[in-house]
Image (cartoon, grey):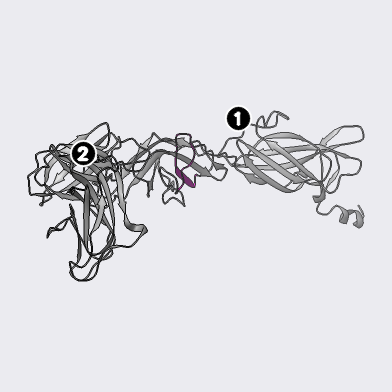
Amino acid sequence: MSLATAMAVIGATMTAAGQVAVASERATNLVATPGNRQIRLDWTEPSTIPSGYSLLGYYVVVYNEDDTELGRKECTNTAGSDESCTISSDIDGDTGTGDTTADDLQNGVPYALSVIPRWEDASRVEQVGDDNESERVTATPRTVPDAPVNPAVAFTGESEISSGELPTVSAVVSWQKPDDGGATIDQYDAVPVDADGDAIGPDGDSATTGDNSDGCSAAGEESVRCTMSGLALNSSFYFAVSATNDAGESDAAQSAQLITPPGPPSITSISQTSSGVVVIWTAPTGDAAITEYTVEALDGDGEVAGSSTWTSGSLRATIADLTEGERYTFQVTAQNTSTYEGNPLGAGYGVAGEFNQAVTISSTASGSFEPLTPVRIMNTRDGDKVGSLDVAGDSEAYELQVTGVAGVPADGVAAVALNVTAVSTEANDFGGYVTVYPCGTRPDASNLNFVSGQTIPNSVIAPVSSAGKVCFYVYGKAHLLADVSGYFGT
């Protein structure tokens, strides 16, 4: 062999067909993309073809972690420099050279892949030279996880609720880890949804997504817990729970229906009748059905002096047998089908409502009481405030016709039941007050007391004048609202 010939074959090897194999006769730029029980392999075809041969196609060779060849997949040749082939099943079925009993790729198992060109000579005889095998690349097949298993929800919240405060309603969503699809689950998401599976956002009617921007960490546990905060009161919804790995997000598993505790009802009227004190209220906001209300009268010590339970009909209840001359505060609580262990009022109860409404029991008006649907019959906010900041006695009373309006008869009326509210109040250092009376001589008494900057209501049983009017005297200044909820006959 001459020196020139020897130098020509330095760095090269002989193929089984006697051809010289050089680096340019190998596939390059291999890229392996994992999928569900498969790997797609892309590469660039050899830049040089041995003299007298044409490129027939390729074998993609598959190896396991122990560097054992599992099989070869025949892939056809396409025109151009970029080639690809997807390996998934029957990897030892083309050549019979594999020594594995499992033909399909498995998720979560790493594989190494290489490419061997298949040459064809002029006689159309195929030649395969293992010396032309490319470098190897590694990939692990995987798919998205299965849906989380058995999502369940339990409430968590404050251990004590004081008057006028709403509880912090949170829920703990828990589930078992699903099959990870061959790749580590790195995030879970629990999203409130309605019955149709549509997500309910922070501005929705039922719930907010809570503080879950970073998802819930799997942390290698068999079960996962995620706390969702900021859930709206008296809401009915579900949690859709999904898992995410490198391949993407799973289908969502839906929890059973979740119903949060009710919020506070709103008392609209408290009035005294011959049979007791009638309390009228409106339902709390939200889409969960209220199954029961409890109305309670609290004495000066905060003890329950009387109560009544509502289960159906208009939202009103009567509490009887209260002591004349005593002042009582009334509250209404709501119950739905939720179970909320953090609420001291009992499972499923909302917060007691409207603690600032009270009434002093007086002697009963002579006629029977006829309740009405509450109607607003006075609102001075479109004009000047009533009253004066000058010395007491200098301001004129505001006269209001109450008979013949809003369902109150034009005659035969002894008194009306009103809910009176002072708005945007102004007072001096001694405070201000409102006196409601049947016009004529003003009594030296107050029905509502205020300081500056308040909006404050109270319930009043007001006798009417012979002309069917009621007068409102204000020491200080305020806009006045009055809602009538019934009347007493003569």
The correct choice, above or below, for 93 with respect to 208 in the image is above
Q: The disc labelled 1 sits on which kind of residue?
A: Ala
Point out the residue furthest to the front here: 467
Residue 252 placement, left or right of 10: left
Which percent across, then down, holds residue 332? 22, 43
Q: The disc labelled 2 sits on which kind of residue?
A: Thr
User: In the depicted view, which residue is nearer to us: 132 or 415?
Assistant: 415
Task: Tell me the crowding category of disc 1: few under 14, some 14 to 19, or many 20 or more residues within 10 angstroms, Cα based.
Answer: few
Q: Residue at x 90, y 57 (%)?
A: 3
Which percent across, then down, holds residue 200? 46, 43
Nearer to us: label 1 or label 2: 2
Dot 1: element: loop
As for residue 188 lying within the magenta part, the answer is: yes
Which percent across, then down, holds residue 130? 76, 41
Kindly tell me whether residue 344 is visible in this rendering: no
User: In the depicted view, which residue is nearer to us: 369 or 179?
Assistant: 369
So how many labels did they put on this image? 2
Please name the residue that numbered disc 2 is placed on: 294
Which percent across, then down, holds residue 472? 22, 56
Which segment is the magenta one?
185-201
Residue 264 placement, left or right of 178: left
